[in-house]
Amino acid sequence: MVLCAPDKGARDFVKQMFTTLGLSKAKFIMLDKERTAERKVEITLHKESEHTFDGLEGSSIVLFDDMVRTGSTVVKSCQFLQQINPQRMVFAVSHFYASDEGRERMAHPAIGEILTLNTLPTILNRDEQGRLRKKMVVLKVEKWLAQELCNLLNLPQTQEANPYKIDMSSKNPRFRRKIWFSEELSELK
């Protein structure tokens, strides 16, 4: 598995994720983004990236970012990462607030799957997501947030073994499969 930061803004977040996950077999790469026009970016491997592309062919790649709007960076990053010939390309984003243009752009085949949180109400609107619903996996986090809030405020609570719920369209190829992202992560530990 390869964890990837698409630009300088995401670097510290992805590095923290990499460290927290403790994936001994995983690699961490950093990309650089240069904006050449309002909606055009050029992507390169960061000169100080911890790993290069050597030996990464066939890896599963998870590209993390905090938000997406136009999709220019994520699509260009995923296209750039195709030179690794990844087994799987997942774009993981905290806040999915894509414009119509962004949703259309992210239908690009370089992105295999989009993992996001339900922090914005429109994310679960399948009509709005259109073609992307085949790629979307939404991690519903409201129960987890409620548990953490109870912890902070010292309020009584019921602990759920798994406070996260996964939502995806029946159009998503993983809808019926039993292989989940978390199981893949546990195999790497």
Image (tube, rainbow, N blue to C red):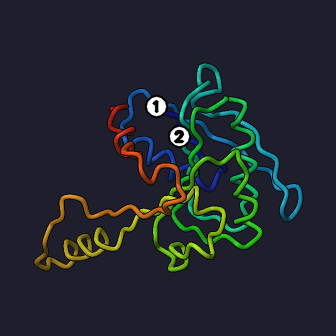
Q: In the displayed structure, does residue 143 sit left or right of residue 103?
A: left
Q: Residue furthest left?
A: 156
Q: In the displayed structure, does residue 24 sit left or right of residue 72?
A: left
Residue for badge 1:
26
Q: Earlier in the sequence, mark 1 or mark 2?
A: 2
Where in the figure is residue 41, as x and y percent of width and height?
81, 53
Residue for badge 2:
3
Front position in the image: 138 or 72: 138
Residue type marked 1 = Ala
Q: In the displayed structure, does residue 154 sit left or right of residue 70?
A: left
Q: Quadrant of residue 93?
A: bottom right
Distance from label 1 to label 2 (Cα)? 7 Å
Where in the figure is residue 24, as x and y percent of width and height?
38, 29
Helix, strand or loop at mark 2: strand
Where in the figure is residue 143, as x and y percent of width and height?
28, 72
Where in the figure is residue 89, as x and y percent of width and height?
59, 42
Please determine whether, in this image, residue 26 is positioned above or below residue 171: above
Residue, x 58% and y 47% (percent of image)?
A: 63
Residue, x 85% and y 65% (percent of image)?
A: 38
Residue 115: mark: none
Q: In the displayed structure, does residue 146 sit left or right of residue 135?
A: left
Residue contact at pointers 1 and 2, CB within 8 angstroms: yes
Helix, strand or loop at mark 1: loop
Q: Residues within 10 Å of mark 1 (few under 14, many from 20)?
A: some
Please determine whether, in this image, residue 108 is positioned above or below residue 21: below
Residue, x 38% and y 39% (percent of image)?
A: 185
